[in-house]
Image (cartoon, grey):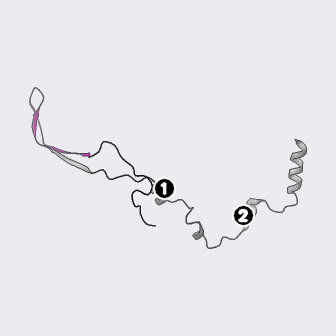
Amino acid sequence: MQAIYETHFTGLAGETEGPRQAAASRPIEGGEAHLAGFIRSAFTELDTLFPRLPNPTLVLYVFPHLAGPEGLPVPGYATTFTLYERTYYALPGEVPGPER
């Protein structure tokens, strides 16, 4: 095992740069433009393959009423709820996504 280890490093002794130094010294052509599809941004993080399907929010107004055995007055109020109980997601390609 020691012989394999030493052979490996004697083979590398002839090289002047390691792969990381060679990559770092290479000039970047076109700046970051050529990395446009690979750079992570907030938009690409939030852009999902499975978009949420529309789930309308309904508004219900509850009229003033008397509640309970004592007949306590309850003022009128508005509440909201979604039409569907669950959130549904579309498969990739089912819903046209934002154009890039």
Does 89 sit above or below residue 37?
A: above
- Which label number is shown at residue 25? none
Which portion, as a residue range, is magenta? 64-90
Q: Secondary structure at mark 2?
A: helix
Q: Is residue 57 left or right of residue 91?
A: left
Residue behind mark 2: 23
Circle on res. 45: 1
Q: Residue furthest right?
A: 3
Crowdedness of circle 2 by 10 Å Cα count: few (<14), some, many (20+)? few
Where residue 63 sits, quadrant-wise, is top left
- Disc 1 element: helix
Percent across and percent down for residue 87 are: 35, 46
Residue type (three-letter) at the residue carrying disc 2:
Ala
In the image: residue 5, left or right of residue 37: right
Q: CA distance from mark 1 to mark 2?
A: 27 Å
Compared to 90, does 36 lie above or below?
Answer: below
Q: Image point 72% across, 68% down: which residue? A: 26
Q: Relative to the observer, which residue lies in front, 90 or 25?
A: 90
Local packing at callout 1 (Cα closer than 10 Å; few below 14, some 14-19, many 20+) is: few
Query: Residue 34 location in percent, x, y?
Result: 59, 69
Q: Is residue 81 above or below residue 98?
A: above
Residue 91 is situated, as x and y percent measured from the top left of the image, at 43, 52
Q: Earlier in the sequence, mark 1 or mark 2?
A: 2
Residue at 56% across, 61% down: 39
Residue visible at 85% across and 56% down in the picture: 12
Check residue 86 for magenta coloring. yes
- Identify the amino acid type marked 1: Glu
- Residue that appears at 13% across and 28% down: 68
x, y (%) of residue 47? 45, 57
Number of residue marks: 2
